[in-house]
Image (cartoon, rainbow, N blue to C red):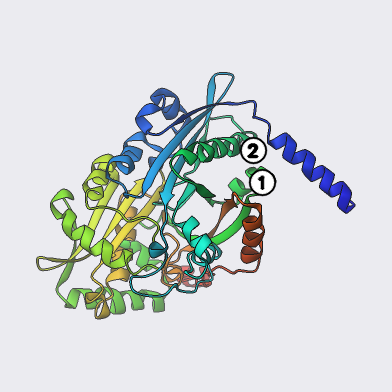
Amino acid sequence: MSILAHYRSNLKDKRALRRPSELEFAIADGIDYVNPAHWDAVTADAGFFFERSYLRVLETAGPENLAPRYALIYRDGAPVAALNMQLVRIEAARMRKEGSAVASSRNPAKRLIRHLAKPAAATLNERVRQRVLVCGNLLSYGFHAAAFAEGTPPETVWPAIAEVLYRVRRAEKLSGQTNFVLAKDLTAPELKASRILEKFSFHAVETEPNMVLELNPAWKNHEGYLAGMASKYRSAVKNQIIKPIEEAGCKLVVVKDVGAVAARLQALYLEVHQNASLRPVTLPESYWPALAAAAGNRLRVIALMQGELMLGFIGCLKDGETGVAYHIGFDRAASADLPIYLRLLHAAIEHLIAMGAARISLGRTALEPKARLGAKPQPMWVWMRHQQPLINQVTRRLLGFAQHDEAPEVNPFKKEKEKTA
Protein backbone atom coordinates (compact mmCIF):
# COMPACT_ATOMS: atom_id res chain seq x y z
CA MET A 1 0.00 0.00 0.00
CA SER A 2 1.34 3.41 -0.93
CA ILE A 3 1.84 6.14 1.67
CA LEU A 4 -1.06 8.12 0.19
CA ALA A 5 -3.37 5.12 0.18
CA HIS A 6 -2.37 4.31 3.78
CA TYR A 7 -3.07 7.92 4.79
CA ARG A 8 -6.50 7.87 3.12
CA SER A 9 -7.36 4.54 4.74
CA ASN A 10 -6.25 5.80 8.15
CA LEU A 11 -8.26 9.02 7.70
CA LYS A 12 -11.34 7.02 6.72
CA ASP A 13 -10.94 4.84 9.84
CA LYS A 14 -10.63 7.87 12.09
CA ARG A 15 -13.75 9.49 10.63
CA ALA A 16 -15.69 6.29 11.15
CA LEU A 17 -14.44 5.94 14.71
CA ARG A 18 -15.42 9.49 15.60
CA ARG A 19 -19.06 8.69 14.96
CA PRO A 20 -21.08 7.51 17.99
CA SER A 21 -21.37 3.76 18.37
CA GLU A 22 -24.68 1.99 18.02
CA LEU A 23 -24.74 1.10 21.72
CA GLU A 24 -26.20 3.05 24.64
CA PHE A 25 -24.57 4.01 27.93
CA ALA A 26 -25.40 4.75 31.55
CA ILE A 27 -22.40 6.45 33.18
CA ALA A 28 -22.32 6.98 36.96
CA ASP A 29 -20.13 8.64 39.58
CA GLY A 30 -20.97 6.03 42.23
CA ILE A 31 -21.77 2.34 42.29
CA ASP A 32 -25.10 3.04 44.02
CA TYR A 33 -26.17 5.11 41.01
CA VAL A 34 -26.01 2.23 38.52
CA ASN A 35 -28.91 -0.17 37.98
CA PRO A 36 -27.99 -2.90 40.52
CA ALA A 37 -29.85 -5.71 38.77
CA HIS A 38 -28.18 -4.92 35.44
CA TRP A 39 -24.72 -4.57 37.01
CA ASP A 40 -25.05 -7.83 38.92
CA ALA A 41 -26.33 -9.69 35.86
CA VAL A 42 -23.39 -8.62 33.69
CA THR A 43 -20.74 -9.14 36.40
CA ALA A 44 -22.12 -12.39 37.83
CA ASP A 45 -19.02 -14.35 36.74
CA ALA A 46 -16.50 -11.50 36.97
CA GLY A 47 -15.49 -12.09 40.58
CA PHE A 48 -14.97 -10.16 43.78
CA PHE A 49 -13.44 -7.05 42.25
CA PHE A 50 -16.68 -6.28 40.38
CA GLU A 51 -18.96 -6.79 43.36
CA ARG A 52 -20.78 -3.65 44.40
CA SER A 53 -19.86 -4.18 48.07
CA TYR A 54 -16.17 -4.11 47.20
CA LEU A 55 -16.49 -1.12 44.87
CA ARG A 56 -18.31 0.71 47.64
CA VAL A 57 -15.24 0.14 49.85
CA LEU A 58 -13.11 2.06 47.36
CA GLU A 59 -15.63 4.92 47.42
CA THR A 60 -15.95 5.17 51.21
CA ALA A 61 -12.53 3.99 52.44
CA GLY A 62 -10.28 4.19 49.39
CA PRO A 63 -7.35 6.43 48.45
CA GLU A 64 -8.06 10.15 48.78
CA ASN A 65 -6.81 10.91 45.26
CA LEU A 66 -8.97 8.29 43.54
CA ALA A 67 -12.51 8.86 42.26
CA PRO A 68 -14.39 5.91 40.71
CA ARG A 69 -16.56 6.04 37.62
CA TYR A 70 -18.78 3.27 36.24
CA ALA A 71 -20.68 2.54 33.08
CA LEU A 72 -23.24 0.05 31.85
CA ILE A 73 -23.27 -0.51 28.11
CA TYR A 74 -26.55 -1.53 26.45
CA ARG A 75 -27.57 -2.99 23.12
CA ASP A 76 -31.27 -2.63 22.28
CA GLY A 77 -32.04 -2.00 25.94
CA ALA A 78 -30.21 -5.06 27.27
CA PRO A 79 -26.97 -4.65 29.30
CA VAL A 80 -24.00 -6.22 27.51
CA ALA A 81 -21.03 -4.90 29.49
CA ALA A 82 -20.06 -3.22 32.77
CA LEU A 83 -17.11 -0.85 32.91
CA ASN A 84 -15.02 -0.08 35.99
CA MET A 85 -13.02 3.17 35.80
CA GLN A 86 -10.94 5.28 38.17
CA LEU A 87 -9.87 8.90 37.96
CA VAL A 88 -6.62 9.35 39.83
CA ARG A 89 -4.73 12.55 40.59
CA ILE A 90 -1.04 11.79 40.20
CA GLU A 91 1.64 14.06 41.58
CA ALA A 92 5.35 13.90 40.87
CA ALA A 93 6.05 13.15 44.54
CA ARG A 94 4.21 9.84 44.19
CA MET A 95 6.48 8.71 41.38
CA ARG A 96 9.58 8.21 43.51
CA LYS A 97 10.66 7.14 46.97
CA GLU A 98 10.54 9.67 49.76
CA GLY A 99 13.62 11.89 49.67
CA SER A 100 15.13 10.28 46.60
CA ALA A 101 15.46 11.07 42.93
CA VAL A 102 13.38 9.38 40.29
CA ALA A 103 14.66 5.83 40.04
CA SER A 104 15.39 4.05 36.80
CA SER A 105 13.32 1.08 35.71
CA ARG A 106 12.96 -1.29 32.83
CA ASN A 107 9.18 -1.26 33.21
CA PRO A 108 7.98 0.83 30.23
CA ALA A 109 4.86 2.16 31.92
CA LYS A 110 6.87 3.24 34.95
CA ARG A 111 9.55 4.76 32.74
CA LEU A 112 6.98 6.84 30.91
CA ILE A 113 5.36 8.17 34.08
CA ARG A 114 8.73 8.93 35.64
CA HIS A 115 9.84 10.64 32.46
CA LEU A 116 6.79 12.86 32.68
CA ALA A 117 7.53 13.55 36.36
CA LYS A 118 11.06 14.92 35.83
CA PRO A 119 11.34 18.44 37.27
CA ALA A 120 13.17 19.64 34.17
CA ALA A 121 10.10 18.99 32.06
CA ALA A 122 7.96 21.69 33.66
CA THR A 123 5.01 21.48 31.27
CA LEU A 124 4.76 17.72 31.40
CA ASN A 125 5.27 17.78 35.15
CA GLU A 126 2.26 20.09 35.48
CA ARG A 127 0.21 17.69 33.39
CA VAL A 128 1.19 14.64 35.44
CA ARG A 129 -0.01 16.56 38.51
CA GLN A 130 -3.46 16.44 37.02
CA ARG A 131 -5.43 13.27 36.44
CA VAL A 132 -5.28 9.94 34.69
CA LEU A 133 -8.39 8.02 33.65
CA VAL A 134 -7.81 4.34 34.35
CA CYS A 135 -10.01 1.64 32.92
CA GLY A 136 -9.43 -1.02 35.54
CA ASN A 137 -8.39 -1.13 39.18
CA LEU A 138 -5.14 0.37 40.46
CA LEU A 139 -5.47 -1.72 43.62
CA SER A 140 -5.50 -5.14 41.97
CA TYR A 141 -3.68 -7.28 39.44
CA GLY A 142 -5.69 -8.75 36.59
CA PHE A 143 -8.33 -7.66 34.11
CA HIS A 144 -10.83 -5.77 36.25
CA ALA A 145 -11.64 -3.14 33.63
CA ALA A 146 -14.71 -4.60 31.95
CA ALA A 147 -17.13 -7.49 32.35
CA PHE A 148 -19.20 -8.82 29.47
CA ALA A 149 -22.63 -10.39 29.53
CA GLU A 150 -22.82 -14.07 28.71
CA GLY A 151 -22.87 -14.59 24.96
CA THR A 152 -21.48 -11.13 24.17
CA PRO A 153 -18.25 -11.21 22.08
CA PRO A 154 -15.92 -8.70 23.80
CA GLU A 155 -14.53 -7.44 20.49
CA THR A 156 -17.99 -6.12 19.57
CA VAL A 157 -18.08 -3.96 22.71
CA TRP A 158 -14.58 -2.46 22.77
CA PRO A 159 -15.49 0.37 20.33
CA ALA A 160 -18.22 1.36 22.79
CA ILE A 161 -15.72 1.16 25.67
CA ALA A 162 -13.50 3.59 23.79
CA GLU A 163 -16.47 5.92 23.40
CA VAL A 164 -17.28 5.74 27.12
CA LEU A 165 -13.67 6.60 27.98
CA TYR A 166 -13.84 9.55 25.60
CA ARG A 167 -17.13 10.77 27.09
CA VAL A 168 -15.85 10.50 30.67
CA ARG A 169 -12.60 12.27 29.84
CA ARG A 170 -14.43 15.10 28.08
CA ALA A 171 -16.94 15.49 30.91
CA GLU A 172 -14.13 15.71 33.46
CA LYS A 173 -12.77 18.86 31.83
CA LEU A 174 -15.14 20.71 34.16
CA SER A 175 -13.03 19.52 37.09
CA GLY A 176 -9.62 19.66 35.45
CA GLN A 177 -7.77 18.26 32.49
CA THR A 178 -7.44 14.50 32.15
CA ASN A 179 -4.49 13.83 29.86
CA PHE A 180 -3.73 10.12 30.07
CA VAL A 181 -6.11 7.23 29.57
CA LEU A 182 -5.03 3.71 30.55
CA ALA A 183 -6.74 0.35 30.18
CA LYS A 184 -4.84 -2.00 32.43
CA ASP A 185 -3.89 -5.60 32.97
CA LEU A 186 -5.03 -7.32 29.80
CA THR A 187 -3.92 -10.88 29.16
CA ALA A 188 -3.36 -12.15 25.62
CA PRO A 189 -7.03 -12.96 24.82
CA GLU A 190 -8.19 -9.59 26.15
CA LEU A 191 -5.47 -7.79 24.22
CA LYS A 192 -6.57 -9.50 21.02
CA ALA A 193 -10.23 -8.61 21.60
CA SER A 194 -9.38 -4.94 22.24
CA ARG A 195 -7.11 -4.31 19.23
CA ILE A 196 -9.62 -1.76 17.95
CA LEU A 197 -8.11 0.66 20.49
CA GLU A 198 -5.09 1.06 18.21
CA LYS A 199 -7.32 3.01 15.84
CA PHE A 200 -8.06 5.42 18.70
CA SER A 201 -4.34 6.19 19.15
CA PHE A 202 -3.91 3.83 22.11
CA HIS A 203 -0.59 2.00 22.34
CA ALA A 204 -0.24 -1.49 23.83
CA VAL A 205 2.60 -1.80 26.34
CA GLU A 206 3.70 -5.06 27.92
CA THR A 207 4.31 -4.70 31.66
CA GLU A 208 5.93 -7.01 34.17
CA PRO A 209 3.99 -10.26 34.31
CA ASN A 210 1.67 -11.35 37.06
CA MET A 211 3.24 -14.32 38.82
CA VAL A 212 0.75 -17.19 39.09
CA LEU A 213 1.25 -20.42 41.02
CA GLU A 214 -0.87 -23.29 39.74
CA LEU A 215 -1.78 -25.56 42.65
CA ASN A 216 -1.57 -29.31 42.19
CA PRO A 217 -4.85 -30.90 43.40
CA ALA A 218 -2.69 -33.45 45.24
CA TRP A 219 -1.41 -30.70 47.55
CA LYS A 220 -3.86 -30.80 50.43
CA ASN A 221 -1.77 -28.53 52.65
CA HIS A 222 1.57 -26.69 52.80
CA GLU A 223 3.39 -29.91 53.67
CA GLY A 224 2.05 -31.49 50.49
CA TYR A 225 3.22 -28.47 48.49
CA LEU A 226 6.72 -28.78 50.01
CA ALA A 227 6.75 -32.51 49.36
CA GLY A 228 6.25 -31.77 45.67
CA MET A 229 9.46 -29.74 45.59
CA ALA A 230 12.88 -30.99 44.60
CA SER A 231 14.97 -31.67 47.69
CA LYS A 232 17.26 -28.64 47.39
CA TYR A 233 14.33 -26.22 47.18
CA ARG A 234 12.45 -27.98 50.00
CA SER A 235 15.53 -27.87 52.22
CA ALA A 236 16.05 -24.18 51.44
CA VAL A 237 12.48 -23.37 52.50
CA LYS A 238 12.76 -25.32 55.75
CA ASN A 239 16.25 -24.20 56.74
CA GLN A 240 16.40 -20.66 55.36
CA ILE A 241 12.81 -19.49 55.83
CA ILE A 242 10.79 -21.55 58.31
CA LYS A 243 13.56 -22.42 60.78
CA PRO A 244 14.87 -18.85 61.38
CA ILE A 245 11.33 -17.61 61.94
CA GLU A 246 10.60 -20.34 64.48
CA GLU A 247 13.92 -19.86 66.26
CA ALA A 248 13.08 -16.16 66.65
CA GLY A 249 9.94 -17.13 68.55
CA CYS A 250 7.58 -15.99 65.79
CA LYS A 251 4.29 -17.59 64.87
CA LEU A 252 1.59 -17.10 62.27
CA VAL A 253 -1.95 -16.32 63.36
CA VAL A 254 -5.21 -15.52 61.59
CA VAL A 255 -6.39 -12.03 62.55
CA LYS A 256 -9.88 -12.36 64.01
CA ASP A 257 -10.72 -8.69 64.33
CA VAL A 258 -9.16 -6.63 61.53
CA GLY A 259 -10.53 -3.38 62.88
CA ALA A 260 -8.80 -3.89 66.23
CA VAL A 261 -5.36 -4.05 64.57
CA ALA A 262 -6.00 -1.66 61.68
CA ALA A 263 -3.49 0.89 62.97
CA ARG A 264 -0.70 -1.71 63.02
CA LEU A 265 -1.69 -3.05 59.60
CA GLN A 266 -1.53 0.49 58.26
CA ALA A 267 1.91 1.12 59.75
CA LEU A 268 3.32 -2.10 58.28
CA TYR A 269 1.66 -1.44 54.91
CA LEU A 270 3.20 2.03 54.77
CA GLU A 271 6.68 0.66 55.51
CA VAL A 272 6.45 -1.34 52.28
CA HIS A 273 4.38 1.13 50.28
CA GLN A 274 6.58 4.16 50.94
CA ASN A 275 9.62 2.23 49.78
CA ALA A 276 8.03 1.61 46.37
CA SER A 277 9.31 3.65 43.46
CA LEU A 278 5.83 3.94 41.89
CA ARG A 279 2.89 4.53 44.25
CA PRO A 280 0.09 6.47 42.55
CA VAL A 281 -2.40 5.79 45.37
CA THR A 282 -2.11 5.21 49.13
CA LEU A 283 -4.67 3.34 51.20
CA PRO A 284 -6.04 4.87 54.43
CA GLU A 285 -6.33 3.02 57.73
CA SER A 286 -10.10 2.75 57.36
CA TYR A 287 -9.65 0.54 54.30
CA TRP A 288 -8.63 -2.59 56.21
CA PRO A 289 -11.79 -3.22 58.24
CA ALA A 290 -13.95 -2.12 55.31
CA LEU A 291 -12.28 -4.66 53.01
CA ALA A 292 -12.66 -7.41 55.61
CA ALA A 293 -16.35 -6.64 55.99
CA ALA A 294 -16.93 -6.72 52.22
CA ALA A 295 -15.00 -9.95 51.63
CA GLY A 296 -16.27 -11.87 54.67
CA ASN A 297 -14.87 -15.38 54.96
CA ARG A 298 -13.25 -15.08 51.53
CA LEU A 299 -10.46 -13.02 53.13
CA ARG A 300 -7.96 -14.14 55.74
CA VAL A 301 -5.45 -11.69 57.12
CA ILE A 302 -2.42 -13.65 58.33
CA ALA A 303 -0.13 -11.94 60.83
CA LEU A 304 3.41 -12.90 61.80
CA MET A 305 3.68 -12.30 65.54
CA GLN A 306 6.72 -12.13 67.80
CA GLY A 307 5.12 -12.17 71.19
CA GLU A 308 2.63 -9.30 71.17
CA LEU A 309 4.37 -7.48 68.30
CA MET A 310 3.09 -7.91 64.75
CA LEU A 311 6.10 -8.04 62.40
CA GLY A 312 4.17 -8.48 59.17
CA PHE A 313 0.89 -9.46 57.54
CA ILE A 314 -0.48 -10.72 54.25
CA GLY A 315 -4.03 -10.85 52.95
CA CYS A 316 -5.32 -14.09 51.42
CA LEU A 317 -8.35 -13.49 49.22
CA LYS A 318 -10.33 -16.31 47.58
CA ASP A 319 -11.85 -14.98 44.35
CA GLY A 320 -13.62 -17.86 42.64
CA GLU A 321 -10.99 -20.51 41.91
CA THR A 322 -8.18 -17.98 42.16
CA GLY A 323 -6.45 -17.14 45.41
CA VAL A 324 -4.90 -13.70 45.61
CA ALA A 325 -2.02 -12.75 47.88
CA TYR A 326 -3.69 -9.40 48.39
CA HIS A 327 -1.73 -6.68 50.23
CA ILE A 328 1.35 -7.18 52.35
CA GLY A 329 3.18 -5.20 54.98
CA PHE A 330 6.16 -5.91 57.19
CA ASP A 331 8.66 -4.35 59.55
CA ARG A 332 11.60 -3.47 57.32
CA ALA A 333 14.07 -3.22 60.19
CA ALA A 334 13.15 -6.68 61.48
CA SER A 335 13.29 -8.10 57.96
CA ALA A 336 17.01 -7.30 57.83
CA ASP A 337 17.53 -10.26 60.18
CA LEU A 338 14.49 -12.43 59.47
CA PRO A 339 12.98 -13.70 56.16
CA ILE A 340 9.61 -12.14 56.97
CA TYR A 341 8.55 -11.47 53.38
CA LEU A 342 9.27 -15.02 52.21
CA ARG A 343 7.58 -16.53 55.26
CA LEU A 344 4.46 -14.50 54.54
CA LEU A 345 4.40 -15.75 50.93
CA HIS A 346 4.50 -19.32 52.19
CA ALA A 347 1.75 -18.49 54.65
CA ALA A 348 -0.39 -17.30 51.73
CA ILE A 349 0.22 -20.59 49.90
CA GLU A 350 -0.70 -22.56 53.03
CA HIS A 351 -3.95 -20.73 53.66
CA LEU A 352 -5.09 -20.42 50.06
CA ILE A 353 -4.63 -24.17 49.61
CA ALA A 354 -6.80 -24.65 52.69
CA MET A 355 -9.35 -22.22 51.26
CA GLY A 356 -9.68 -24.34 48.11
CA ALA A 357 -7.93 -22.18 45.52
CA ALA A 358 -6.83 -23.77 42.25
CA ARG A 359 -4.15 -21.13 41.60
CA ILE A 360 -2.58 -18.19 43.39
CA SER A 361 -2.02 -14.75 41.91
CA LEU A 362 1.11 -13.32 43.54
CA GLY A 363 1.39 -10.01 41.68
CA ARG A 364 4.16 -8.34 39.73
CA THR A 365 6.92 -7.42 42.16
CA ALA A 366 9.78 -9.64 43.39
CA LEU A 367 9.69 -11.90 40.34
CA GLU A 368 12.71 -14.03 41.32
CA PRO A 369 11.55 -15.20 44.79
CA LYS A 370 8.06 -15.86 43.43
CA ALA A 371 9.56 -17.95 40.61
CA ARG A 372 11.35 -20.00 43.28
CA LEU A 373 7.94 -20.72 44.79
CA GLY A 374 6.94 -22.30 41.48
CA ALA A 375 4.98 -19.35 40.10
CA LYS A 376 5.05 -18.75 36.36
CA PRO A 377 4.75 -15.40 34.57
CA GLN A 378 1.39 -14.48 33.09
CA PRO A 379 2.10 -11.80 30.45
CA MET A 380 0.06 -8.62 30.77
CA TRP A 381 -0.38 -5.44 28.76
CA VAL A 382 -1.83 -1.98 29.27
CA TRP A 383 -3.29 0.33 26.65
CA MET A 384 -2.02 3.91 26.95
CA ARG A 385 -3.19 7.10 25.29
CA HIS A 386 -2.37 10.77 25.69
CA GLN A 387 -4.73 13.42 24.35
CA GLN A 388 -1.95 15.30 22.53
CA PRO A 389 -0.88 13.62 19.27
CA LEU A 390 2.70 14.83 19.73
CA ILE A 391 2.91 13.20 23.16
CA ASN A 392 1.45 10.05 21.64
CA GLN A 393 4.34 9.97 19.18
CA VAL A 394 6.83 10.47 22.01
CA THR A 395 5.08 7.76 23.99
CA ARG A 396 5.37 5.34 21.07
CA ARG A 397 9.12 5.95 20.80
CA LEU A 398 9.75 5.84 24.52
CA LEU A 399 7.88 2.58 24.96
CA GLY A 400 8.95 0.92 21.75
CA PHE A 401 12.50 0.43 22.94
CA ALA A 402 11.92 -0.02 26.66
CA GLN A 403 12.15 -3.45 28.27
CA HIS A 404 10.24 -4.77 31.23
CA ASP A 405 11.64 -7.06 33.89
CA GLU A 406 11.59 -10.74 32.98
CA ALA A 407 10.83 -13.52 35.43
CA PRO A 408 13.64 -16.09 35.69
CA GLU A 409 12.97 -19.63 34.55
CA VAL A 410 12.84 -21.73 37.70
CA ASN A 411 11.22 -25.12 38.29
CA PRO A 412 11.41 -25.95 42.00
CA PHE A 413 9.26 -29.06 41.70
CA LYS A 414 10.28 -32.69 41.31
CA LYS A 415 10.82 -33.99 37.83
CA GLU A 416 8.94 -37.09 36.71
CA LYS A 417 11.90 -39.37 37.54
CA GLU A 418 11.97 -38.12 41.10
CA LYS A 419 8.20 -38.58 41.48
CA THR A 420 8.32 -42.21 40.41
CA ALA A 421 11.54 -43.11 42.25
Q: Quick one: label 1, few (<14), some, or many (20+) residues within 10 Å? A: some
Residue 281 or residue 236, whichever sits in front: 281
- Picture quadrant of residue 51: top left
Q: Residue at x 39, y 25 (%)?
A: 36
- In the rendered image, residue 186, in percent from the top left (x then y), is placed at 55, 50
Numbered disc 1: secondary structure: helix
Residue 221 visible to the viewer: no
Q: Determine if residue 315 is in view.
A: yes
Q: Whole-percent x and y of residue 63?
A: 32, 50
* Residue under numbered circle 2: 155
Check disc 1 and report the residue beneath it: 195
Q: Residue at x 65, y 69 (%)?
A: 401
Front position in the image: 418 or 377: 377
Q: Are marks 2 and 1 in contact (CB under 8 Å)?
A: yes
The answer to which image quadrant residue 175 occupies is top left
Question: Percent x, y for residue 42?
Answer: 48, 30
Q: Residue at x 74, y 36 (%)?
A: 15
**The disc labelled 2 sits on which kind of residue?**
Glu
